[in-house]
Each structure stands twice: as structure tokens, then as C-alpha cells.
Image (cartoon, rainbow, N blue to C red):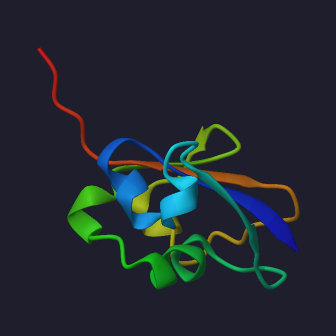
């Protein structure tokens, strides 16, 4: 199945070089793949995976290892962001 994987801010550096500018990557994943399974190959530092959304809905950290994705889902991840 295909999903869209998006990494924002400093996390975009973990995408392939040709996808960093647009910060998204279409991905073929197995049916029922979880958030953790999809992100594992990208070796994202746990401390930088702050805000995780599937189709614009927040997924709490405790649900990420078991939250299955479906065809067409958009998985978006942001690092912690400080501002003033």
C-alpha cells in the first residue's frame, strides 16, 4: 500500500536528498504497517520525534508502536520547536 511520509524542520535531513526540499516522500509499505515500522529505516532520533500526526490527527507516543496505517494515509512528524 502507499502512504505519504512527511518530515518537517530539521527532520527533513533524514529524507533522501532529492526529497528534502519538498519534505515528503511517497512510500510503499506493507498492509497494516505501524508508525514505528515505517519510521525505523529512517533512524530518526527518538528525542527529535515530538509531534506525530496521521491525516492531521495527533498520535500519542504510547500508540505509535501499534497504530496501523492504511492506504493513502499521510504520516507527518515534527521535532520539538522552540520559539519566543
What is the residue that sits farthest to the front in this orientation?
A: 18
What quarter of the picture does the N terminus occupy? bottom right
Instruction: Give residue 33's position: percent from left, percent from top.
Output: 71, 80
- Percent x, y for residue 60? 45, 54
Query: Which residue is at a point 43% across and 44% down the rendered structure image?
Result: 8
In this view, the residue in front, 44 or 13, is: 13
Q: Quadrant of residue 49?
A: bottom left
Task: Give the side of residue 10 with respect to residue 18, left or right.
Answer: left
Q: How many marks?
A: 0
Residue at horizontal 77 percent and vertical 62 percent from the top:
3
For this orientation, the residue located farthest to the top is 84
Q: Is residue 71 above or below residue 21?
A: below
In the image, residue 9 sits, relative to residue 25, either above or below, namely above
Task: Say which quarter of the image contains residue 58.
Answer: top right
Q: Nearer the viewer, residue 72 or 14?
A: 14
Q: Residue at x 63, y 69 (%)?
A: 67
Position of the C terminus by quadrant: top left
Q: Is residue 83 left or right of residue 36?
A: left
State the residue at coordinates (64%, 37%): 56
| Coordinates of residue 28 in the picture (x, y in percent) | 79, 76
Q: Position of residue 64 (x, y in %)?
A: 51, 68
Amino acid at each position: 500500500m502507499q502512504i505519504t511520509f512527511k518530515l518537517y524542520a530539521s527532520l527533513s535531513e533524514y529524507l533522501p536528498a532529492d526529497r528534502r526540499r519538498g519534505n515528503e516522500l511517497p512510500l510503499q509499505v506493507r498492509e497494516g504497517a505501524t508508525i514505528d515500522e515505517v519510521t525505523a529505516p529512517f533512524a530518526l532520533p527518538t528525542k527529535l520525534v515530538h509531534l506525530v500526526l496521521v491525516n492531521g490527527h495527533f498520535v500519542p507516543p504510547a500508540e505509535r508502536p501499534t497504530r496501523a496505517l492504511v492506504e493513502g494515509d499521510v504520516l507527518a512528524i515534527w521535532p520539538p520547536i522552540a520559539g519566543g
